[in-house]
Amino acid sequence: MTKQAVHPSINLKLCKKCTICINICPEKVLEPDESGLPLAIRPDKCTACGLCTTHCPDFAIEIMPVPDSGLYDNDNTK
Ligand code: SF4
Ligand code: SF4
């Protein structure tokens, strides 16, 4: 029963700082930084539920596997 290591990844060029992802995350993974951009302050709490990604109006947030978690292929280095 291994928990998959994931974390939200925000595309800073697409993010409009609407805070939807911050408010919808049931695990309180995200908080705004001083400029209002979402910051993953508790990435280890992310359950990959997908709520943040499906509710982002700008497609600016993805859930990514954490490097060295065993989820990367060997050739995933580009
Ligand atoms: S996938 Fe779910 S738990 Fe993870 S940051 Fe997004 S809303 Fe929060
Ligand atoms: S929902 Fe999308 S656009 Fe809004 S703050 Fe989150 S990442 Fe940025």
Image (cartoon, rainbow, N blue to C red):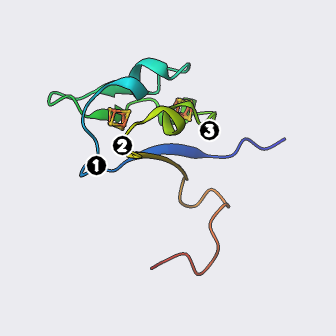
Q: CA distance from mark 2 to mark 3?
A: 19 Å
Please name the residue that numbered disc 3 is placed on.
48
Q: Is residue 38 above or below residue 5?
A: above
Q: CA distance from mark 1 to mark 3?
A: 20 Å
User: Which element type, helix, strand or loop, lies under badge 1?
Assistant: loop
Label 2 neighbourhood size at 10 Å, few (<14), some (14-19), many (20+)? some
Residue 71, given in percent of the width and then of the height, sits at: 66, 60
Label 1 neighbourhood size at 10 Å, few (<14), some (14-19), many (20+)? few
User: Which element type, helix, strand or loop, lies under badge 3?
Assistant: loop
Ligand 1, image quadrant it occupies: top right
Please name the residue that numbered disc 2 is placed on.
58
Q: Are marks 1 and 2 in contact (CB under 8 Å)?
A: yes
Which quarter of the rendering shows the C terminus? bottom left
Type of amino acid at the residue the image marks with label 2: Asp
Q: Is residue 18 above or below residue 6?
A: above
Label 3 neighbourhood size at 10 Å, few (<14), some (14-19), many (20+)? some
Most extreme residue toward the left is 35
Question: Which is closer to the viewer, label 1 or label 3?
Answer: 1
Q: Is mark 1 within 8 Å of ligand 2?
A: yes
